[in-house]
Image (spheres, rainbow, N blue to C red):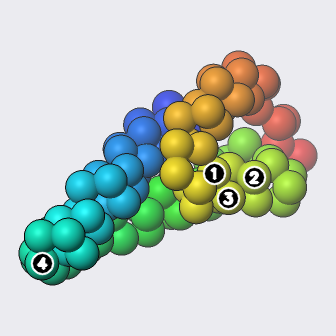
Amino acid sequence: MSTRNLRIIAWIEGLSYLVLLGIAMPLKYLADEPGAVRVTGMVHGVLFMLFCVALAQVWQRRRWSFLRSAIVFASALVPCATFFMDRHLVRWDTEPLPADN
């Protein structure tokens, strides 16, 4: 998987997180509509797992350090952080791939 694909997944996952926190959770607690969290939570969970798989593949392919990969992973845990992480992913994508030995 490419860094570009990771960026796309990160954006979609970040949006789903905002929908979960900003729309579904208030519907659950203010309008007594738990179905919104059930559906949105499942979609967000699948997207989060896809993000983790994409990150693992990019980590291996581009031979990122553990720290860099951990920071990218942590960005998925903080609301809106994936959007700020995107500029770093763009910059890191322009780094040359390590040569195979």
* Upstream in sequence: badge 1 or badge 4: 4
In terms of secondary structure, where does tag 1 sit? helix
Whether residue 33 appears in this view of the structure is yes
* Upstream in sequence: badge 3 or badge 4: 4
Which mark, by number, is residue 75?
1
In terms of secondary structure, where does tag 3 sit? helix
Q: Nearer the viewer, mark 4 or mark 2?
A: 4
In terms of secondary structure, where does tag 4 sit? loop
- Separation of disc 4 and disc 2 at Cα? 36 Å
Q: Which residue is nearer to you in this view: 3 or 98? A: 3
Is the residue 39 above or below the residue 90 in the image?
below
Whether residue 46 appears in this view of the structure is no
Q: Name the residue under label 2.
A: 71
Snapshot quadrant of residue 25: bottom left
At label 4, counting other C-alpha atoms closer than 10 Å, the crowd grade (few under 14, some 14-19, many 20 or more) is: few
- Separation of disc 3 and disc 2 at Cα? 5 Å
* Upstream in sequence: badge 4 or badge 2: 4
At label 2, counting other C-alpha atoms closer than 10 Å, the crowd grade (few under 14, some 14-19, many 20 or more) is: few
- Separation of disc 1 and disc 4 at Cα? 30 Å
Q: Which residue is nearer to you in this view: 77 or 34? A: 34
What amino acid type should be assigned to the residue bearing mark 2? Ile
What amino acid type should be assigned to the residue bearing mark 1? Ser
Q: Name the residue at 35% across, 45% down.
A: 15
